[in-house]
Amino acid sequence: ADETIHASASLADDAQSVSHDSLQNTSRIDPGPDVYPAPDAISSFVRRIFQDSRGNFWFGTNGDGVVRQNDDSLEYFSINKGFGGVAVRGIVEDEDGNVWFGTDGGITRYDGKSFSNFSEKDGLIDDDVWAIMIDSRGLFWIGTLQGVSCFDGEKFTTFAIPATAIENTDFVLSPGRVSCITEDRQGHIWFGTDGAGAYKYDGKSFSHFSKSEGLSDNNVSCILQDSRGTY
């Protein structure tokens, strides 16, 4: 398979239920112009959009927590309603239907009724989460500002990625930040980093890809594999 990598560069409350006609024409209680720059905006900055197995859409924002679309309403969840953070950078669903969120306060699980939060005090390497992925074995991979944790549903384990010298730190938020994690069809785990390029882990060893190997930029924010096996 062609392992050419095409990656994009990265730069460094109450829960409210509100009726709306569509996402383009939203009628709601507006908490203020500093939060909503336009009448039909969900939030001033939406980082993630995810549809769960029940058909609900979840919108991860950069300061308003997470927003769930329930048919004709939008429901806002933030830390004062038990949610783990205000910035949401990853959303996944496990095989039991629990929805998980990577936030600036750790990771949060929603079981359909309530939120459970996991953070450094539970063993997570860092609370500032930038990526969350569940692999084909059901293992969670969590990318944070200070590295990677694995989570088997009971305990966290730190997963070390080889250290690489960063040539240009102008747009690097943290040299330990892992901004995306992907599993390919061969079961390899890929990591996008903040200034160190991308890594592929085959279960035993790492392969490193950077501008020296033809990568367009060493700040990697997304890695995907297409139907032909190209990344």
Image (cartoon, grey):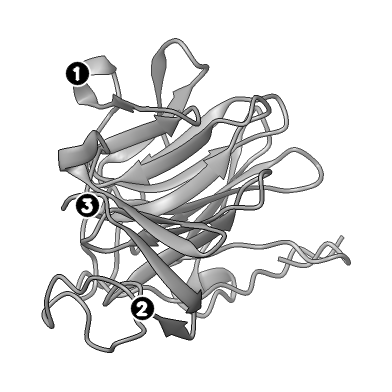
Query: Between marks 2 and 1, how big is the CA–CA gap?
Result: 40 Å
Amino acid type at mark 2: Ser
Residue 170 disc label: none
Q: Name the image quarter holding the N terminus.
A: bottom right
Earlier sequence position, callout 2 versus callout 3: 2
Going by the image, does 92 lie left or right of 148? Answer: right
Q: Taking the image as drawn, is residue 196 in sight?
A: no
As helix, strand or loop, the secondary structure at mark 3 comes to loop
Q: Nearer the viewer, residue 161 or 111?
A: 111
Q: Residues within 10 Å of mark 3 (few under 14, many from 20)?
A: many
Going by the image, does 26 lie left or right of 80? Answer: right
Amino acid type at mark 1: Lys
Q: Which percent across, then down, holds residue 17? A: 34, 56
Query: Between marks 3 and 1, how big is the CA–CA gap?
Result: 19 Å
Q: Nearer the viewer, residue 227 or 117?
A: 117
As helix, strand or loop, the secondary structure at mark 1 comes to helix
Residue 121 disc label: 1
Q: Which percent across, then down, holds residue 32? A: 11, 76
Q: Nearer the viewer, residue 125 or 215?
A: 125
Going by the image, does 61 lie left or right of 199? Answer: left
Q: Name the image quarter holding the C terminus.
A: bottom right
Residue 27 disc label: 2
Residue that sits furthest to the top in the current view: 154
Where 45 falls versus 190 (above or below)?
Answer: below
Query: Between marks 2 and 3, how big is the CA–CA gap?
Result: 23 Å
Amino acid type at mark 3: Val
Q: Residue at x 44, y 51 (%)?
A: 90
Q: Quickly name the residue at label 3.
A: 86
